Amino acid sequence: MSKPVIITCAPTGGIHTPTMSPHLPITPDEIAQGSIEAAEAGAAVIHLHARNPETGRPDPRPELFQQFMPQIAGACDAVINVSTGGGLGMTREERLRAAVTTSPEMASLNVGSLNFGIFPMLEKYSQWKHDWEPEFLEMTRDFVFKNTFADLEYIVKELAHGHGTRFEFECYDLGHLYNLAWLIDQGWLEPPYFVQMVFGILGGVGADLDNLQHMHTIAEKLFGDSYEWSVLAAGRHQMSFATEAAMLGGNLRVGMEDSLYIGPGELTPSNASQVRKIRGIVESLGHQIATPAEARQRLALKGAGNVGF
């Protein structure tokens, strides 16, 4: 039997904008509620970003994270994972502020630079709730999401060595797996490694099942039995790739950071709806869903009692 499937939910992210869905969590209370409901539906890990409660723009201020992280921790046992990806265009220091302040069990780490194009979404909308939205999307036409080797070293030493935080290593392309292997070769990281393979971002590896199979094959060669792997795919590929990951013995991520939809042309009413849908699929395949306690044990996390919030 395969191991129980760890479901991660990313409830808001820093990509989609308020115009795109009335259900996208914006305020601290909305982010907390969406996260708690997702955990109750079966998510063992919650991957968090913050937004300006007035405009919905991605916002790195630790005080915003502190408004919803304690709420989530007080209402459920899910692992709280703080993004270091932040919002596109933020500096490295801005992206790190929340994780350094809150010292979470987990943080994301984007393991390589890439062109990160979300400007094609401009074509879908003619009116916007906020002026910043079209400008934010258009900016990515000439944007590189910077994650250099110096950035990676800095973040690993700051969070892993300084706080005992472990990582969700976000790999948007094949070379990012080798970047992670290089970090490991330096002796800066200890297993197990939680590798999140990301598909369908313009500028990263395409959402083709052959790519998923190949990245899994290479990860097996590089990391052997020293890692856990998970899959997320953007937009309409979300559920099919999550299902494929479960079928291959991996873990998966859903949430409104990655897709605003629950089915073709149908906006998801909540993050919990996506978690319930993929949980039903996974369980129908004969797999179990991992509890937060099982996720902590398999990912060797420091425990919810050793955080700064």
Image (cartoon, grey):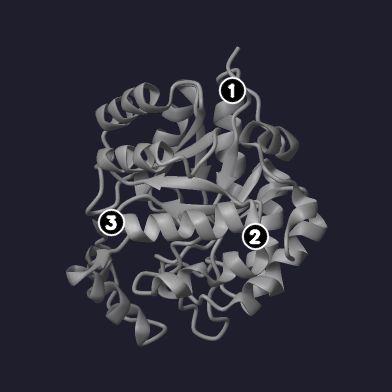
Tags 3 and 2 touching, CB below 8 Å: no
Q: For the residues marked 1 and 2, what is the alpha-carbon distance in whole angstroms?
A: 25 Å
Q: Which numbered mark, 3 or 2, is in the foreground of this view?
A: 3
Q: For the residues marked 3 and 2, what is the alpha-carbon distance in whole angstroms?
A: 30 Å
- Give the image location of residue 35, x and y in percent: 66, 57
- Give the image location of residue 192, x and y in percent: 55, 33
Q: Residue at x 70, y 33 (%)?
A: 297
Q: Can residue 256 be seen by looking at this rendering?
A: no
Sort mark 1 into few (<14), some (14-19) or many (20+) by Cα contacts within 10 Å: few
Q: Which mark is residue 83?
A: none
Residue 93 is left or right of residue 292, and the answer is left
Nearest the eye: 171 or 184: 184
Tag 1's secondary structure? Answer: helix
Q: Residue at x 68, y 65 (%)?
A: 32
Quarter occupied by residue 280 = top right
Q: Residue at x 75, y 46 (%)?
A: 303
Amino acid bearing label 2: Gly
First in residue order: circle 1 vs circle 2: 2
Amino acid bearing label 1: Ser
Tag 3's secondary structure? Answer: loop
Quarter occupied by residue 36 = bottom right
First in residue order: circle 3 vs circle 2: 2
**Quadrant the N terminus occupies:** top right
Q: Can residue 294 be seen by looking at this rendering?
A: yes
Q: Which mark is residue 34?
A: 2
Give the residue pinned by disc 3. 113
Relative vertical location of residue 177 with respect to residue 18 in this rendering, above or below: above
Give the residue pinned by disc 1. 284
Residue 10 is left or right of residue 308, and the answer is left
Relative vertical location of residue 134 with respect to residue 238 in this rendering, above or below: below
Nearest the eye: 217 or 252: 217
